[in-house]
Image (tube, grey):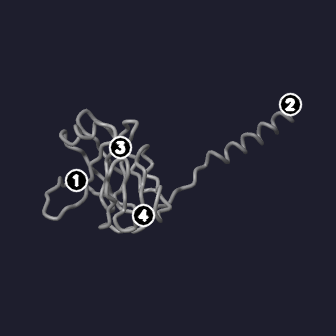
Amino acid sequence: MKKTVVHLSIILLFLSSFSCQKEIRSSIPDSEVYIETSPSEYAILRNPNSAIAYFHRPGVPVPVNFRFGYGGVLIFRDLEGKARSCDLACPVEASRTTRVEIDMPFAVCPVCNSKFDLSYGFASPIAGPAKESLRIYRNVFERTNSIVVSN
């Protein structure tokens, strides 16, 4: 009986070491995000492999409560049809004004030529000098006629 308890304790300790996840640091600073799509934007985003970029454009009015993250926010549907979101700032350049360009299912930095795969929502680098993904925004909620991204 005592041997069984010891073995079980060792197994639980071993398994618990795998359950702790390392915090992933991003070179893109934490920034406030709140975007809510309009019904017409939602109609575009209903299809897999679709995307809309949101960022501050001087002179263009935006709802008072909108927050554009660090370099802007990309809302997209991955190939499985799941709504996803990430920041538009390239982690290599880490600049508010250097935004990746979208050609679904990829995002490409126009400065360093890093290429990110958006196919399954991870925004992982697949080419160029980038070693980290685009900053992912995980609070993506789908409503009847809109998608809301917040943090």
Check disc 1 and report the residue beneath it.
Answer: 65
Q: Amino acid at mark 1?
A: Asn
Which label number is shown at residue 91? 4
Give the x, y percent position of residue 127.
Answer: 46, 59
Check disc 3 and report the residue beneath it.
Answer: 140
Q: Quadrant of the N terminus?
A: top right
Q: Amino acid at mark 4?
A: Pro
Q: Is there a contact, CB below 8 Å, between mark 1 and mark 4?
A: no
Q: CA distance from mark 3 to mark 2?
A: 49 Å
Nearest-to-viewer mark from 3 and 4: 4
Check disc 2 and report the residue beneath it.
Answer: 1
Q: Quadrant of residue 39?
A: top left
Q: Nearer the viewer, residue 7 or 120?
A: 120
Q: Quadrant of residue 107?
A: bottom left
Name the residue at 43% across, 50% down. Answer: 117
Name the residue at 45% across, 65% down. Answer: 27
Q: CA distance from mark 2 to mark 1?
A: 61 Å
